[in-house]
Image (cartoon, rainbow, N blue to C red):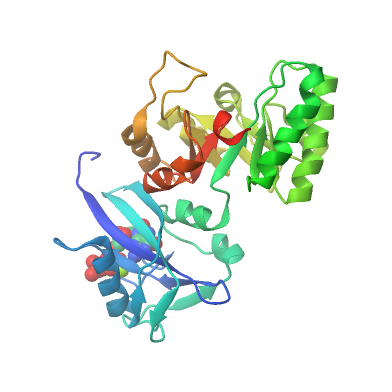
Amino acid sequence: MSDAPRVEVVAAAITDARGRVLLARRTEGRDLAGLWEFPGGKREPGESSEQALVRELLEELGIEVEVGPPLIAVAQQYPHKRLRLDVRRVMRWHGIPRGHEGQALAWVPPDKLPGYAMPPADRPVVAALLQPDRCLVTPVPASPAEDGAWLDALQRALAAGVRRIQARLPGMDPARRIALVTAAAGHCAGAGAELLVNGDANLARELGLGLHLPAAQLRSLATRPVPAGTRLSASCHDVAELGLAEALGCDFAIVGPVARTPTHPGAPGIGWPAFEALREQASLPLYAIGGLGPDDVAIARQHGAQGIAAIRGLWS
Ligand SMILES: Nc1nc2c([nH]c(=O)n2[C@H]2C[C@H](O)[C@@H](COP(=O)(O)OP(=O)(O)OP(=O)(O)O)O2)c(=O)[nH]1
Ligand SMILES: [Mg+2]
């Protein structure tokens, strides 16, 4: 099955002046009937993605669009097919969108998108519209004398626009770790950024923060260690771990190493094709990690990633 050719689908995140996104409901008698989707359809032989999208939106909605920048391209395995859903932003068009094929339409405020039932490939697309494209994993300050400099560097990352941070402070004396994470939480809250604690469910619960599960911890858990509504993420290296992360209701996973990294100099990265092969088997949002930085966000998105996670690449 995984050798089956991919169906190439191109779809649009059409956004109006109020920021609402247009969804269409798949009609009865078709694949995935009743689910909401981003308008679009299959690319035909000889067509570019842009040409296919212009044609599909004219046929389905009766509008003439100007195709905007790429948002994300998601490879996904369904029971009877594999597809690659290439989503472009559309902010400008002529005409008024109508359901020319009898499909219902809805203009949806972005924060309401997760409430619409959509096909599995759309979950990473909705996440790409709503959630941060960079996830900082903190380095460990070498000594207590460097904790102040660590907090300064954290603030520089926040000033640079990082909005999702994992405090990874293994082997640190508990009192010092609590003080550092508490101070970090204050800075993150002030910037509207999200903070997750690596590997310490008690500390996460105590401080009301998110929790990140290292792979070994993920494998040891049968139930969700934090309440629903608290952010939960995991590090995953294979399909089995991704399945566990989905079963626990993780909001996202971090997958890698994609490129070679100074942390693991001997290990070559798995590369983008292997990342995408994992991407196909899961529908939760995935950050690619390992030797990547902010300049790699666009390429990560083209391989179906939410974006990049990094220590060095996001820390100055
Ligand atoms: N347009 C669209 N298709 C999606 C999304 N998510 C998703 O899994 N798909 C799947 C459903 C279908 O298997 C495939 C798109 O094919 P389609 O049936 O809409 O193709 P089409 O518009 O060319 O229509 P048809 O003439 O083949 O009926 O991609 C999405 O958000 N938008
Ligand atoms: Mg279609």
Q: Is residue 30 above or below residue 124?
A: below
Q: Is residue 237 above or below residue 145?
A: below
User: Going by the picture, which residue comes out furthest to the bottom?
Assistant: 95
Q: Is residue 33 left or right of residue 286?
A: left
Residue 220, position in %: x, y?
Answer: 59, 23
| Observer-nearest of 259 and 74 | 259
Residue 29, position in %: x, y?
Answer: 29, 70
Residue occupying image coordinates x 49% and y 71%: 15
User: Going by the picture, which residue comes out furthest to the top?
Assistant: 266
The C terminus lies in quadrant: top right
| Image quarter for ligand 2 | bottom left
Q: Quadrant of residue 36?
A: bottom left
| Observer-nearest of 204 and 166 | 166
Q: Quadrant of residue 257?
A: top left
Query: Can residue 165 be seen in this snapshot?
Result: yes
Residue 63, position in %: x, y?
Answer: 35, 81
Q: Is residue 183 left or right of residue 26?
A: right
Residue occupying image coordinates x 63% and y 39%: 232
The N terminus lies in quadrant: top left
Residue 311, position in %: x, y?
Answer: 58, 30
Query: Can residue 230 be seen in this snapshot?
Result: no
Q: Is residue 106 above or below residue 236?
A: below
Q: Is residue 68 above or below residue 289?
A: below
Q: How many marks?
A: 0
